[in-house]
Amino acid sequence: MTDFQNWMFSIQSRMELVLDKLLPPAHIAPQRLHQAMRYAVLGGGKRVRALLTHAAGEMCGASPQKLEFAAAAVELIHAYSLVHDDMPCMDDDDLRRGKPSCHKQYDDATALLVGDALQSLAFQSLAQPDVYTNAARQLEMVNLLAIASGSRGMAGGQAIDLASIGQNLNQAELEYMHIQKTGALIRAATLIGAYCTDEGEVGAGLSIDRTQAIDRYAQCIGLAFQVVDDILDIEAETATLGKTAGKDAQSNKPTYVTILGLSRAKQLAVELYENAVEPLSAYSSEATRLIQLATFITQRNF
Ligand code: GRG
């Protein structure tokens, strides 16, 4: 196993434990809701957003405990978005993370409540009273996550996505939608990791230059993530993806592949990778994990 794979697996398994502890136990009432929340969050997912939080935090010298609660908050928002996205009133998908999607395993009303409750739990995780020593920075993180998830971020992007079905979007319009739908949360995940550092703490701290470099990285890698997602929708198998392959074409959705064609979409993913890592070149080994993650995100096959 490579050093990067070791790092990734150790964070993925630590995140599983943190999320397990944050989620209400399945035997506590209302049991069905709590079971469904755990079903939607645990035992699946690449945890890309949590990895980004950790990688950015490590670059700025943040402590693991702060990073874990912050990364959990982002993963909880992400899990809520997947549960709602799969519902019949949205993308109507039966498969998620290799198992029946939440509303299929439970029912629509439960899935709706799972999303609502996961969103609240995300902010509870970020609002921990004893973890973050810099209250102003903690408030900034809450604000960042709220904006990224709301109508001018992920939920707004989803609204544009639903309205775009069957429409002929151009590349700029598609990009605008994805900056909000997928990019905003990925950007927040990364910036929140950097914000977990307290000035004067071990490590490099959070200068304006460093924040800007991380922000630029996060915006490019968020878009790259979506371009690769569109490519995989065409090229990968349902069994590998753990979600229905070919769904975009089936739903008549504009994607980078429908607009640019496969080969230009792949070229765009490479360009976005290069644009993402370029601002980090000044930081040498401190930025290693972010650079390795950019490679993982753009070269993944699931
Ligand atoms: C319902 C408010 C609301 C928003 C939904 C992000 C989103 C908006 C829907 C997800 C639909 C989708 C498949 C988007 C493409 C990019 C994406 C977010 C893929 C899933 O993320 P991964 O691959 O999933 O990181 P895992 O399972 O690995 O966590």
Image (cartoon, helix red, strand yellow):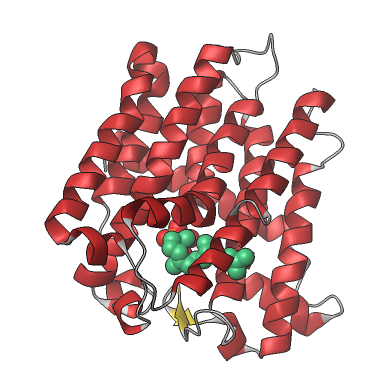
On-image quarter of the N terminus? top left
Query: Is residue 261 visible from the viewing direction of this image?
Result: yes
Q: Which residue appears at 52% of the width and 57% of the height?
A: 181
Image: 52 above or below 22: above
Query: Is residue 43 visible from the viewing direction of this image?
Result: no
Image: 137 above or below 10: above
> In this view of the protein, which residue sits in the foreground, 105 or 230?
230
> In this view of the protein, which residue sits in the foreground, 91 or 26?
91
The image quadrant that residue 278 belongs to is top left
The image quadrant that residue 178 belongs to is bottom left
The image quadrant that residue 87 belongs to is bottom right
Number of numbered labels in the structure image = 0
Residue 293 place in picture, x, y as percent: 36, 39
Q: Which residue appears at 80% of the width and 81% of the height?
A: 31
Image: 227 above or below 199: below
| Residue 119 left/right relative to 103 | right
| Residue 20 left/right relative to 48 | right
On-image quarter of the C terminus? bottom left
Q: Which residue appears at 53% of the width and 78% of the height?
A: 86
> In this view of the protein, which residue sits in the foreground, 137 or 1?
137
